[in-house]
Amino acid sequence: MAAKYDRPGEHNNSTQDYILISRNEEAKALFHRIHRNKHNIATLGLDVESVELGRSVVCIVQIKIQDEPPYIIDIYGSKIDLKATLFNDIMTSAEIEKVIHDPRNDSRMLYETFQTEMRNVFDTQTFQMTVENQANQALTTRRLQCQRKSLDFIYEKYVGRFPNQKLKDDMKSKMSEDQTIWLRRPLTREMALYAALDVETLMPIRVSMSKYLTNMDDGKRIAFLKTYNELCTESIYTPLPIANAEINLRKKLREFEEAKSLQMLGIELNKKEKKLIRSF
């Protein structure tokens, strides 16, 4: 079922429609097609809307394929079981890059619900954190954890004006007031458009970030990607019970080295940074 923008102020160049997947057979067909064409589908946009009710409840999963409308998969309302599809195979595929904004919660929710592991992920939020870290020594990766940038901020920095800021702001307000809003069925038009918009905007951000990397000289690019890859891996795996000791140790060592650098620069350390230095 497709729903199109047909009201004043809703139509824009970024998100023009979406396709709602509300049956298991439709979900199976979608992921079978993606898996069959994985050599041609180099990149997917991915997002998840979920709630916490003492357990993880995945409500919808959004998928964006280049040159196709966003797919909104109604997990909660239609009782779609992603384990019965090729979704997990696609999420671990080295041939398909998954573009996502801040995978920490989504990674945990998908793993707890469907035992999904995510590999070959491009995290737009981590990319921006790395940009800020490389530009300013005082902005350590640890300090940047509490300064993470929103999707609309990043879109405007790399692409241009966010397509429908009013829709984004209105839904954020409603989500703040009702933290179980994604359990409502049927999905309202506003909810569906918000979900479609979030996943749609990931693709142009990815293109612009690729250009940003291309414009770096080789030395800076190597240093940038080293930090980025570490942070991206941590965002995906640290929230999971399968996070290995190597990831956690590497993170601790990097944060220790950053704290020592701050100390050498004469920058005052916070309590956690002082404790980190004492622990080595």
Image (cartoon, grey):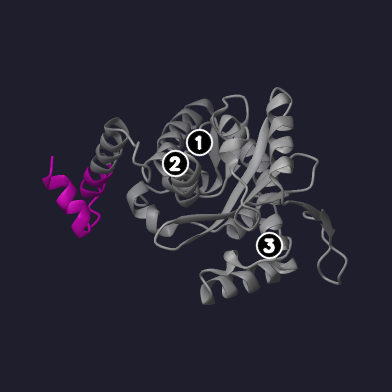
Using the numbered discs, state the Cα–Cα distance from disc 3 to disc 1 in whole angstroms.
Answer: 24 Å
Which residue lies under the disc numbered 3?
Answer: 194
Q: Is residue 69 left or right of residue 274?
A: right
User: At x 21% / y 55%, what residue is drawn?
Assistant: 272
Give the magenta range: 258-280
Q: Please, is residue 64 above or below residue 226 in the view?
A: below
Q: Earlier in the sequence, mark 1 or mark 2?
A: 1
Which of the two labelled residues, at mark 3 and mark 1, occupies the earlier sequence position? 1
What element does badge 2 sit on?
A: helix
Image x and y of residue 38, in percent = 69, 26
Q: Amino acid at mark 3?
A: Tyr
| In the foreground, 74 or 41 | 74
Residue 13 in view here: no
Q: Amino acid at mark 2?
A: Ile
Is disc 1 surrounded by few (<14), some (14 to 19) or many (20+) residues within 10 Å? many
Where disc 1 sits, the SS reads: loop
Residue occupied by mark 2: 236
Percent of width and height locating residue 15:
78, 55
- 62 shown above or below 178: above
Residue at image x 72%, y 51%?
22
Q: Nearer the viewer, residue 85 or 99?
A: 85
Q: Residues within 10 Å of mark 2 (few under 14, many from 20)?
A: many
Could you say where residue 72 lies in the image, as x and y percent from the top left? 70, 51
> Which label number is shown at residue 86?
none
Which residue corresponds to the image point at 27% horizontal and 33% vertical from the top-left? 245
Classed neighbour count for the residue bearing mark 3: other residues with Cα under 10 Å, few (<14), some (14–19), many (≥20): many
Q: Secondary structure at mark 3?
A: helix
**Residue 270 can be seen in this image:** yes
